[in-house]
């Protein structure tokens, strides 16, 4: 993994990372399209209500994977391959145990979970079916993402994209067959989702178990203290998934209280598009992070600044383009999930125009949080990510839902992202004004060796 700062090197990591994220989000959107047109709009709402559970699985995986990968990159930057492999193997082992516990819990309490997520009388049955089936594949969701991230650390970013591409093809193909030919409805969509994750997991396992990787599984002595460093470093990225799930719960419950189940469908349209936008931004951040972390391990401040500023420019350009498209052609996106004849179509178009303004700022917040993580600044990363996803955005939703008979709810995200960006800029100033992140990187080494 060369550290020479260049646009070529940055794009070598950003393009596969962003492509993987876009593929993941697109096949999730296509799954929604197939459910909407192959079953019903009500079924689409049920799936969207259940998505926070998948967000939680992905978030848990990211929480452990990104923190562990950052520590692995630090170790590799210092030339300590054994330490990196021990962190990697221990993280995978913990994930396996957690996934089993999650599956058992959901199978026992699926109805209670569906109600908590916002399911109403017309959506709860489909939501319960979806949750139970998807929970059987919890280990696939959690491990496949972990191994995808570690493949990038192992200097094979293209393989990571290939793994997600395999998952996307399997997902879309099986979902189409299960829904339109076997007529399994929401259950078919859930089964296709789980099997798609199994496909990518098998590909990544083959890479690590068949000697193709430079980094290997190895015996390790369990050191729980290492998670004191892994968890804070993973918060920035995992908060995106947890935030998406948490905000979906809030939006669905608030919309149900204000307008009934119909407006939950409008939010489903916005949520699917937002997933694509956030995954693009997360892909840019994830492409930048291993390069910055490796530079931290080598103490190269010039390279750190180079990759951060170039990634910031890239994110800003993409944001402007996405918002322009949403303002000029919102009908195109709404048509993907709703029929022109739907009584909700015009309201969905208006809501999307308002909500999409928040994309201008969301990507910058995602990139800043990822940058703090790559530096090893876990406290700054946690503060920005948690404040954004669980304080500022939710507070904006509750306050703005009281404006204009509830219609102000669609600009709440813009206000919340703006407040989050202000916090991020303050943290950035303090980070660059303090001694560089190198002392914390050294601390990682000491904790890992403890």
Image (tube, rainbow, N blue to C red):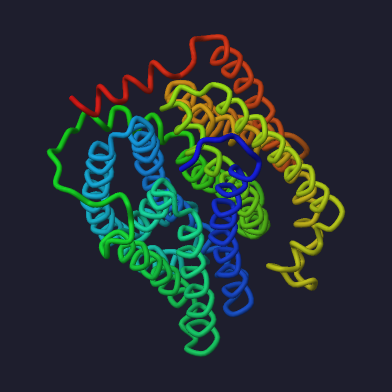
* x and y percentages locating residue 379 in the rendered image: 43, 21
User: Is residue 360 placed above or below 198 in the rendered structure?
Assistant: above
The residue shown at (52%, 64%) is 46
Whether residue 116 is visible: no
Whether residue 95 is visible: yes
The residue shown at (18%, 49%) is 218
Closer to us: 329 or 435: 435
* x and y percentages locating residue 345 in the rendered image: 77, 63
The residue shown at (77%, 66%) is 343
Position of 181 with respect to 418 (left or right) is left
The residue shown at (54%, 81%) is 176
* x and y percentages locating residue 89 in the rendered image: 23, 47
User: Which quadrant of the figure has residue 228?
Assistant: top left
Q: Residue furthest top?
A: 434
Closer to us: 45 or 1: 1
User: Is residue 426 placed above or below 61 in the rendered structure?
Assistant: above
User: Which quadrant of the figure has residue 207?
Assistant: bottom left
Position of 67 with respect to 340 (left or right) is left
Task: Indicate the quadrant containing the C terminus: top left, top right, bottom left or bottom right.
Answer: top left
* x and y percentages locating residue 52 in the rendered image: 47, 52
Closer to us: 126 or 279: 279
Number of numbered markers: 0
Position of 101 with respect to 292 (left or right) is left
Position of 77 with respect to 104 (left or right) is right
Q: Residue furthest right?
A: 328
């Amino acid at each position: 993994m060369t550290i020479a700062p260049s646009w070529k090197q940055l794009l070598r990591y950003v393009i596969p990372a962003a492509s993987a994220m876009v593929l993941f989000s697109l096949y999730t959107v296509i799954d929604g399209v197939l459910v909407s047109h192959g079953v019903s709009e009500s079924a689409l709402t049920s799936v969207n209500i259940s998505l926070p559970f998948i967000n939680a699985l992905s978030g848990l995986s990211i929480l452990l994977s990104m923190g562990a990968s950052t520590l692995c990159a630090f170790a590799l930057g210092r030339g300590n391959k054994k330490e990196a492999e021990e962190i990697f193997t221990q993280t995978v082992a913990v994930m396996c145990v957690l996934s089993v516990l999650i599956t058992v819990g959901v199978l026992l309490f699926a109805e209670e979970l569906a109600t908590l997520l916002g399911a109403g009388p017309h959506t709860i049955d489909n939501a319960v079916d979806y949750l139970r089936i998807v929970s059987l594949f919890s280990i696939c969701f959690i491990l496949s993402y972990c191994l995808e991230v570690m493949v990038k650390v192992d200097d094979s970013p293209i393989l990571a994209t290939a793994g997600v591409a395999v998952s996307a093809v399997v997902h879309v193909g099986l979902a189409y067959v299960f829904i339109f030919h076997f007529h399994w409805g929401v259950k078919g969509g859930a089964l296709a989702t789980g099997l798609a994750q199994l496909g990518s997991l098998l590909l990544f396992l083959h890479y690590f178990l068949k000697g193709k990787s430079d980094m290997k599984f190895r015996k390790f002595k369990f050191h729980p203290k290492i998670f004191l460093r892994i968890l804070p470093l993973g918060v920035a990225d995992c908060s995106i998934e947890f935030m998406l799930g948490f905000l979906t719960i809030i939006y669905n419950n608030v919309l149900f209280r204000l307008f009934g189940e119909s407006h939950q469908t409008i939010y489903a349209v916005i949520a699917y598009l937002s997933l694509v936008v956030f995954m693009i931004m997360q892909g840019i951040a994830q492409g930048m992070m291993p390069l910055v972390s490796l530079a931290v391990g080598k103490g190269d401040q010039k390279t750190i600044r180079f990759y951060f500023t170039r990634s910031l420019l890239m994110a800003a350009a993409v944001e402007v383009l996405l918002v322009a498209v949403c303002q000029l052609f919102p009908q195109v996106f709404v048509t993907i999930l709703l029929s022109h004849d739907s009584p909700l179509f015009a309201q969905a178009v208006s809501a999307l125009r308002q909500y999409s303004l928040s994309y201008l700022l969301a990507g910058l917040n995602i990139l800043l949080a990822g940058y703090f993580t790559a530096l090893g600044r876990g406290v700054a990363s946690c503060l920005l990510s948690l404040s954004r996803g669980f304080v500022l955005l939710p507070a904006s939703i509750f306050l703005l839902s009281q404006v204009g008979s509830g219609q102000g709810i669609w600009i709440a995200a813009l206000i919340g992202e703006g407040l989050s960006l202000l916090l991020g800029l303050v943290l950035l100033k303090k980070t660059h004004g303090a001694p560089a992140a190198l002392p914390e990187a050294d601390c990682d080494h000491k904790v890992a060796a403890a």
